[in-house]
Every structure is written in C-alpha cells, then in structure tokens.
Image (cartoon, rainbow, N blue to C red):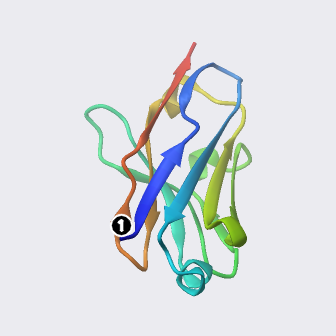
Amino acid sequence: QVRLVESGGGLVQAGGSLRLSCTASGMILSVFNSDTLGWYRQAPGMERELVATITGGAVPNYQDSVKGRFTISKDNTKRRVYLQMNSLKPEDTAVYYCHSAVRRLWGQGTQVTVSS
C-alpha cells in the first residue's frame, strides 16, 4: 500500500524558513522516478491550491506567489520530495499536502503557521 507521509511543518516567524519532506512509502522506485510530485496548500476557508510540482525529469513549476522563495526538489533513492520555504510570510499559513499524480494520492497534510 502506497502512502505519502509529510513532515517538517511548524510555527515560524515571518522571514523564517522551514523545510517540508514527503516520503512515498511503498512506492516502486521506477514509479517514483517517473511521477510528477507536488505540494499543495489549503488555508482556512480557502480552496486547495498548487504551490509547486516537480516532474520525473526534475523540472520544477511554481505558483507565482512563491517563486524565488520556495524550492522543490526530490531524492529518488529515498523516494522523498522536499519543499524548502524561505522568507515565509503570514499568508503562507496553511496545511501543506503532498500529491502523487501517478497514484492520484494525497498525504495527510502538515500545518505551517507563520506569525507576523
């Protein structure tokens, strides 16, 4: 059974940094290597929105509001995708979810709270 398990959320002051990790537990390596993996977020009362994705060929894509501040990367050998978040703003506060396009699977989410 494949599961996406996120970690790394927390409370940080504006201007600070956090790194989120998502491990694709139980996913075959060849599937992970070809998958498009993404980070999405959902703030209270808002729709879930795309933050960043990374293709099997490691091509990243970012929402405009996080460009230059966030970096998505992956480690195929660990079946892990990361989201490095710098210069955090209060408006980045949300539950962050990991997503697998191939498996159409979501993680359970990790809370990120940025205080002003």
Residue 69 pos. (x, y %): 71, 43
Task: Looking at this view, name the residue that lies furthest to the left.
Answer: 45
Residue 20 pos. (x, y %): 60, 44
Residue 75 pos. (x, y %): 71, 66
Residue 82 as seen in the image, left or right of residue 99? right
| Of residues 63 and 94, the one drawn nearer to the viewer in this rendering | 94
| Of residues 44 and 25, the one drawn nearer to the viewer in this rendering | 25
Residue 84 pos. (x, y %): 69, 45
Is the residue 8 above or below the residue 47 in the image? Answer: above
* Residue 86, quarter of the rendered image: top right
Residue 111 as seen in the image, left or right of residue 90? left
* Residue 3, quarter of the rendered image: bottom left
What is the tally of numbered marks visible in this picture? 1
Q: Which residue is mark 1?
A: 105
Q: Residue at x 59, y 80 (%)?
A: 29
| Of residues 112 and 8, the one drawn nearer to the viewer in this rendering | 8
> Which quadrant would the C terminus be assigned to in this image?
top right
